[in-house]
Image (cartoon, rainbow, N blue to C red):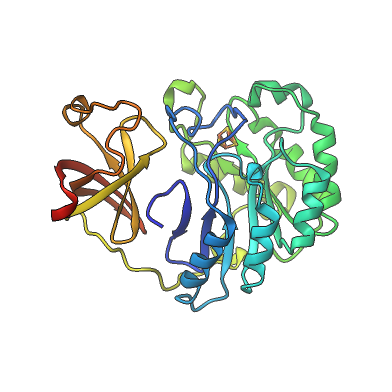
Amino acid sequence: MGVDFIGLTDRCSNLIEVKPITGCNLNCIYCWVSDIEKTNDFTIPSDYIVEEFSKLKRLKKHPVQAHLLSHGDILLYKQLPELVKDLKSLNATTSIDCHLQSLTQSLVQELIDSGLDRLNVTIDTLNPEKVFLIYKQEFDLEDKLEIIKQAALKLDIVISPVLMPSINKDEALAFINWVKKHIPKRKHPRLLFQKYIPYNPSQGLKSESFKTFKEFLKSLELKTGEHLIFKPEEFGIFKDECSKPVFKLGQHVNVQLISPSRVKNQFLGIAKNKLLKCNASKELLSNVKNKDQPFIGAYFQAIITRVINNCYECQLISNKTPQNY
Ligand code: SF4
């Protein structure tokens, strides 16, 4: 716990985010993860995740959900079925957020056999001619949609397109009709339109306000009778106890750097048994002799600059020796 892109994230509800891997072979048009200058990818062994998850689960009052996702493509995680199975054995409801491209019939079957409860799949078009435009690669869309149709017979499926005004908003009605035809109506919602958020304006994609987006969904609800605007409770998600933050904004801490982080000039550090993203100034970096492994293993004094849920960021200030750490 401690960084947002890997590990466990506790947002004070009964849903615990589980991110076992970073890294992605895809190239979605709206992606902000692929736009950052990445230097490193990470993966966590399944048994370690399960061990830490079970500690966090003890805090919760409501039935716990393990929501598996990634700042990347979670389907690249080799131990995914094993992780689902072990989380299920802790009585957690399990769901996975994924894209379509890496999904195969055999992987879906393995996940069903492991006890997966719900698959949230981002499908951004039903038109094979738009595949390259959206993903900068070709794949057989019909084939992938068939996998989803088959999976829907045995598993809860949520289709979650990212609606982009200039790219696929005109397909919204087609999505509703497709879902009505192929995804059985069960306890949870089956279609969840996501609003495109321009994290990186240089993508040059048109966006819209939340108000416009919500009004559009309301008009579709009226026209089609399909429920499209949800509260977290409809997915069984409720506010709950959460792990207390171990650092405060502005607090001085001693950290040991253990690895380069995902982006340039940022490192991962450990303090009080938590991970932190640690930013280094240019002056600090210019003093580094070993440019391949700068600072790794070294101890620093740092100041906490960001605290969100149980995720932390700090600015490195000065070196410390292990003796006075
Ligand atoms: S799957 Fe996710 S991380 Fe990968 S390119 Fe698409 S949006 Fe980005």
Tell me: residue 106, above or below residue 61.
above
Query: On the rendered image, what quadrant is the C terminus found in?
Result: bottom left
In this view, the residue in front, 214 or 158, is 158
In this view, the residue in front, 181 or 221, is 181
Quadrant of ligand 1 in image: top right
Q: Tell me residue 124's x, y (percent).
A: 67, 35
In this view, the residue in front, 249 or 233, is 249
Q: Residue at x 15, y 42 (%)?
A: 319
Number of numbered tags placed on the structure image: 0
Judge left or right: residue 285 versus residue 232. left
Taking the view exactly as shown, the residue that stands out farthest to the front is 323
Tell me: residue 325, above or below residue 141.
below
Query: On the rendered image, what quadrant is the N terminus found in?
Result: bottom left
Q: Residue at x 80, y 50 (%)?
A: 180
Image quadrant where residue 92 sits: bottom right
Judge left or right: residue 97 versus residue 8. right
Q: Is residue 181 visible?
A: no
Q: Tell me residue 316's x, y (percent).
A: 20, 41
Q: Is residue 207 visible?
A: yes
Q: Tell me residue 28's x, y (percent).
A: 60, 29
Q: Residue at x 69, y 21 (%)?
A: 132
Tell me: residue 196, above or below residue 135.
below
Taking the view exactly as shown, the residue that stands out farthest to the bottom is 61
Q: Tell me residue 165's x, y (percent).
A: 58, 29
